[in-house]
Amino acid sequence: MTLTQLNYILAVDRCRNFAQAARECFVTQPTLSMQIQKLEDYLQVIVFDRSKNPVEPTPMGKKVLEYAKKVMHGANELEELSKSIRGEVAGEFILGVIPTLAPYILPLFVQKFIEEFPTVELKIFEYQTDEIIRFLKEGKIDGGILAVPLEVKEIKEEHLFFEPFKIFFSPEHNLLKKKTVDEKDLDLSEAWLLKEGHCLRAQALQLCQYKKVKGDKNLFFEAGSLETLINMVKSSSGFTVLPYLACQNLSIQDKKLIRDFKGHLPVRDISFVTGPLSMKTSIEKALSKVILKNIPKELKKNSDKGDVLAIQ
């Protein structure tokens, strides 16, 4: 029994077709079929019912496939561990980033990272926080960039930087007369928020919790992106809370609608997180290093300050 044979049966399981699986494995169909037959002879188990179209695993074959997945996962992790021990930065890395951060942080470091580490195949997906946690536990992704704390035992958090919050007002808002705004002056009934599931929504609610909702806004709306919130605020009334990096993409005119919080600087803690199955230490360290090297200087300063107020 060999890893190659296990890889072949997993390919057939995915494709449910011997010819297609052979193409995926870059071998001829007779070669793939012969190796699978050898594995079945060795185990004395028929893995696939070849009379079906598409082919299907037999009841015992399903159990063999389950173990094959575990063995191949272990083999891949062992290979990644050996790379980390040697300090080799190479291989595939799947990264999840929350939607309120991805559009703004990825352009800062991705191109520089792939130029510096061409042997890394970096795959990036936008996921919400609960999805990143679940996928890390299941081993479907290798790491994530999001706001912490998560308070999940299996998840390791490595602090990157503190990202300050800003207030973005509608053009005619009376609080624009102030240079800085106390959170107690914010009225939640005027707030435009992201929909449920975004961690930034909860953070915004925490910042605006001091005033009772008046309920005088006859429009209920929850956005899926910060860009939508910005446009709604500009075209109507009220305000929204934006993270620092999102403000950097605004036009000069729109930046005039931004105000800082008064007193302690409210921030979110942006961290690089990994799960219990992650062993790609060399790539993790390389990613963190490149990210920190390319974020704005203001964020580096905030990470060293003692007067920040982390919002969970």
Image: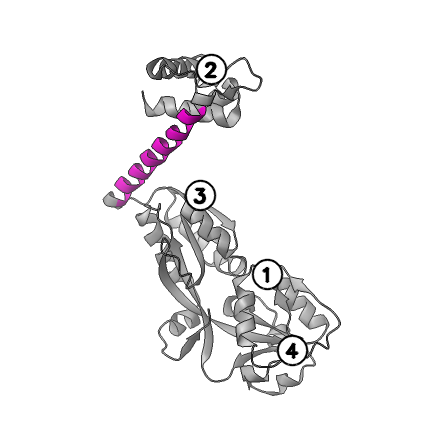
Residue 12 highlighted magenta (yes or no)? no
Instruction: Mark 1 vs mark 2: give the one in front.
Output: 1
User: Which contiguous range is marked in magenta?
Assistant: 62-84
Determine which residue is flagged by label 2.
29
Most extreme residue toward the left is 86
Residue type, numbered disc 3: Lys
Which residue was labeled with disc 3? 140
Q: Does residue 185 show up?
A: yes
> Decide: marks 1, 3 in contact (CB < 8 A)?
no
Circle 2 or circle 3, nearest the eye = 3
Q: Which mark is residue 213?
A: 4
Which quarter of the rendering shows the N terminus?
A: top left
Identity of the amino acid at label 2? Gln
Between circles 1 and 3, the one closer to the viewer is 1
Sooner in the amino-acid sequence: mark 2 or mark 4: 2
- Name the residue located 52 percent from the left edge and 55 percent from the top edge: 128
